[in-house]
Amino acid sequence: MNAQQGAKLPISEHLPSNVKWLYDELGASSDIVVRTFSDANTGLDGVFFYIDSLVDQQTINQMLIGPVLAEIGENPNVKSSSEWMGLLKNKALSVGRLKDIHRLDEALAQLMEGNTIIMLQGSRTAMAASTAGGEKRSVEEPSSQTVIRGPKESFTENINTNMSLLRRRIKSPGLRVAYKQIGTQTKTHVAVVYLKDIAKDGVVREVMERLDRIDTDAILESGYIEEFIQDAAYTFFPTIQNTERPDAVAGGILEGQVAIIVDGTPFVLLAPVTFIRFLQSSEDYYQRYDIATFLRLIRYVAFFVSMLLPSLYIAITTFHQEMLPTPLLISLAAQREGVPFPAIIEALVMEVTFEVLREAGVRMPRVIGPAISIVGALVLGQAAVQAGLVSAAMVIVVSFTAIANFVIPAINMANAARLIRFIMMILGATLGLFGIMSGLMVLLIHMSSLRSFGVPYTAPFAPFIWSNWKDVLVRLPHWAMKKRPTAVSSMRNLTRQGSGQMPEKPKKSGHERDTTKQSDE
Amino acid sequence: MERISQPQLAALVVMFQIGSSPLFLLGASAGADAWIAVLVAMLAGLLLLVLLTLQIRRLEPDKDLVEMFRTYFGRVIGYAFAIAYFVYFSYKSVRNIREFGDLMILYLLPSTPLFIVIGCVLIVAGFAVWQGIEAFTRMTQIIMPVVLIIYAAFFFMIYASGLFDIHRIQPIADKGLGKVAEAALPEIVSFPFGEMVLFLMLWKYVASKKKTFRTTIRCYVYTGLFLTATNIVIIASLGPISQISVVPFIQIMSQVEIASVIERLDPLAASLIFAGVFIKMTAYFFGAFLVGGHLVKTKKRYLVVGVGAVLFIGALTFRSYMQHIWFGFEQNLKYHFPMFQIYIPALLLLVMLFRSRLRADGNRQS
């Protein structure tokens, strides 16, 4: 019997055949539990059917089996199975979600969710009690997006935990959640979360449609979804943001973004997104605005450095030496004297070395960690220079580039800069500054043509939206950002905070207003 | 259809007008009064823009030039005019590409073959055209503030390094205004101010059409003043040398030296020119592409490759940079360009007015 036939199969009154069908469909796997119970006096005959590895044992024991067994023998007058069904539902089964089911395929789907099926002999209706459980990781500190000041919670792999982290941050009734199941094999739960009237309707609809279009057998991480629903297939630039910080997701939702939470991964997707969001960190909003602005400018610089520095170094030392001040030029020439390679080879060797080190640092067992820094710093840095393989200036350039890359808060944007860097290096080595300029032009044209769920990627630079500039190059204080950025949020509910909240020196100072007088005066 | 916004139109007008103009000393034959010639030409160009080009747009805001030709001159003559404008836009683009290539070789890549530089530039420009008018204007919008800020920084550096000497432009108009007018008309009118005729191909893409007139005029005037200022800076910094220098602006930048830290900025200036010339060239490429689309009746983007190939061959046919400059300033500006910038549009406007009068009469009679 296959699933196609099962799709039409109603639950029969004959209990053993129902159990057998389910048992056969699941291939008699060893983690299936069929717990029978019966009452000879009233002719009650039933089973609890569940998959051991998906359920929470404690719930089943205390909330289902315990109460049901307690009812047996207490009700000698109950005759029919439907009466028993009502009795169990109203008196015994103490779980929140209880669902009547009428077909066997439904029962199978419920089983796979970790629910427990309760079936009675002689009843065409069965019940599915929500008992999903299983081991899960507790909420920990974010490991990839750390902040100094700000919440230290991170999403986990469990979608319910993640939803509660989010709901607890935005207690508005306008927070809308729509669940979907994607993947014919994995049947992964995906939640689309947004704020009504703050997210654009069109964007929400577009997200839903694109999610519905996905036809795949497995979703194991939000990256799968990202690749299916992103706007441009061929681009270095991410058009969907991801984060493991609940506060960042809450902030995004409050600016009109739609969050896509995928069961099984702590990384939540946020769309639509513009380029500048990848250079903003949630900490920008927790720290004072002056330092936040400064850090943001540093990040913009770091983005360009990590993309362009090696290529500029190559282009200038190869083609445009006249641009350098003479003393610097002499010093560079002296360093490069013994180096047997042209600048591009030198740079490529060092860059590839660094990329290898970086990848090794991620893959390697944690115990060996310190070894890599010794190898990296001493052997590859100092020794390579002393051996005359690379110049000291090149080591400085490559290391600074590498460090600058880590400044970019979003790892996917940092990766874009990382890949573009290599193309730029080749352009710089073949066509000098002209090549780099051409490359930048192509990049700019490409970015101008990108959209993320209908929002231009380069907003608010182009199209130019002056009202959104309060949070781009600078971060103004919260009381000055009265409106949400219109590039992403809906026009219906733009006001974020009331006007006139700029702190002022009060007319009376605090201790003058203090009405409690000292009594012993 | 793709739409561009008013600020994007503004950015495009500004960058298009700036283009390669600050490179040259416009109106060099007027000597120290060249800047007055620029001002005069700007006003004359403004007149042309208000009375001719923008009038045509006002009458047919939803059509581009080729569609207007077809409507008012019939299919055959309209097609001939379309071919003429294809040649004109391509030729203008070719001139910019060639200028660009030669400058890059002069200042950045002395030993690279010309065809490689031109090929690269055409690939980048073709990519912009391929991505469509929206992406192109957005890019312009991002580049414009950067370019203007760098120009401002350059002007400041020229002043700070003491090169700027206002006495070099005095006495004002000592040879009489006749000489100034002679320099201004028709040369400077047709380059760069008369070139606004290209926008007859682009205006139809602009959203909220009511503001188009104002935006265009404003940006045109600002850019005209900017070019006048550049002219003053060039003359006041270089003096008489400016008239014999190949690229006076870059020459000034090579002389800037502040505290022996900021010096030899000419590669940087060349990169700045890159942006200006690139956008102008791409705009003309776009014009040629749009006209070409009408000519062979296709809306396929693959046409970019064909038009690009035409431009590539065209750009390599000039024998040398000097021939190219001479041909441009001596022949084209006086004889050829006014035809496309003034005479044909004027003819078109006359026919349009005549036809609309006829139609109005016809309506009254019926």
Image: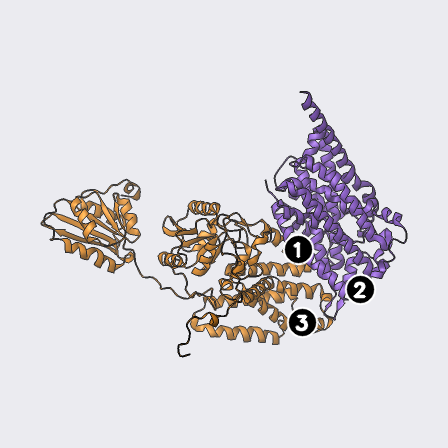
Measured from the top left, where is residue A475 in percent x and y? 55, 61
Distance (Cα) linking label 3 and label 1? 38 Å
Measured from the top left, where is residue A345 in percent x and y? 62, 65
How busy is the neighbourhood of tag 1: few (under 14 within 10 Å), some, or many (20 plus)? some
Do callouts 2 and 3 mark residues in contact (Cβ within 8 Å)? no
For the residues tagged 2 and 3, is the chain the same?
Answer: no
Q: Reading the chain from its start, which is encountered first: label 1 or label 2? A: 1
| Chain that the image shows in purple | B
Distance (Cα) linking label 1 and label 2? 25 Å
The residue where tag 1 is placed is: B145
Do callouts 3 and 1 mark residues in contact (Cβ within 8 Å)? no
Q: Is residue A375 left or right of residue B284?
A: left
Task: Determine whether the residue tagged by mark 3 lies in a helix, strand or loop.
Answer: helix
Measured from the top left, where is residue A220 in percent x and y? 40, 55
* Label placed on residue A477: none
Q: To which chain does the residue with label 3 belong?
A: A
How busy is the neighbourhood of tag 3: few (under 14 within 10 Å), some, or many (20 plus)? many
Q: Quadrant of residue B255?
A: bottom right
Mark 3: amino acid? Arg
Distance (Cα) linking label 2 and label 3? 36 Å
User: Which quadrant of the rendered structure holds the N terminus of chain A?
Assistant: top left
Number of marks drawn = 3
The residue where tag 3 is placed is: A336
User: Foreground: B105 or A102?
Assistant: A102
